[in-house]
Amino acid sequence: MSSPINVTVTGAAGRMGKRLIALVHESSRLRLAGATEAKGHPALGKDAGDVAGCGSLGVALTDDPVQALAASDVVIDFTAPEATLHHLAQAVQLKRAMVIGTTGLSPDAMDQLRRHAESIPCVQAPNMSVGITVLLQIIGKVAQALGNDYDLEIIDAHHNKKKDAPSGTALKLAEVLAAAKDWDLQDAGVYARHGLIGERTKNEIGIQTVRAGDIVGDHTVLYAGPGERIEITHRAHNRDPFAHGALRAAEWVVNQPPGLYGMADVLGLSR
């Protein structure tokens, strides 16, 4: 049996970080080698497994990513854009693979990510779930098959603590629909409607945002045509689909050459 892959989890005391640590602990193919948090976080120095609720793992939370990454093969990052870019630069310095699930990355941040990925293998996706990855493969084909008589809408629902809107997943869904219709999303995307706005145009994609309660993540693509509509919905019941997808990406990316990859690459759907 081959040696397990050593993993560092950044943002280890957050909701996603704790779930990632618990699932790494359950895996026979992965081993937690490092866990980081921001300077001043009250969990620093505590055992990462105790913080995650899965029992002591002998890995203390640290605010020194370089120390954590040095012991790892791959780092998994679900933090915030600025922190992610900082961790990415350190991964490049140490030649470590990376999996990034952080959302809200600006165009400039994505440009930096692409440049860094010339030096290390990196999987980046706004949504790591297998279900969403498969959904992204089909929604454009549905839009093309239905033709111009069907209006396209996206409904994005998340918990009330989510900071970015629309979600990265909703934007990715919109990008796929726009590409399938040969539209520029900058022109076609409609993010709010209020007042006397007139009739809906044909060449637009409505992207509506809901932020309420503890909704983990619901995304609906709506195709509304004459006398009928089709709704394709993905609902995350908890954070496990994102965590499982990230761990699957971590296992895959350590064996890849430098480059920027997506979850479709991980699942073999981009061939």
Image (cartoon, rainbow, N blue to C red):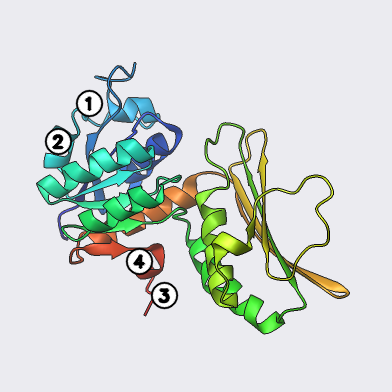
Q: Say which residue label 4 marks.
A: 266
Q: Is residue 208 found left or right of 197 in the rendered image? A: left
Circle nearer the N terminus (2, 4): 2
Secondary structure at badge 3 equals loop
184 or 207: which is nearer to us?
184
- Is residue 143 placed above or below 44 in the rendered structure? below
What's under tag 2, amino acid-wise?
Val
Cα separation, mark 4 vs mark 3, equals 8 Å
Cα separation, mark 3 vs mark 2, equals 34 Å
Q: Say which residue label 3 marks.
A: 269
Residue 210: image location, x then y, percent: 68, 42
Residue 116: image location, x then y, percent: 21, 54
Graded by Cα atoms within 10 Å as few (under 14), some (14 to 19) or many (20 or more), the crowding at tag 4 reads: many
Q: Say which residue label 2 marks.
A: 66
Q: Label 2 near label 3: C-beta < 8 Å?
A: no
Q: Say which residue label 1 marks.
A: 62
Q: In this rendering, does residue 8 appear at all?
A: no
Residue 153: image location, x then y, percent: 70, 61
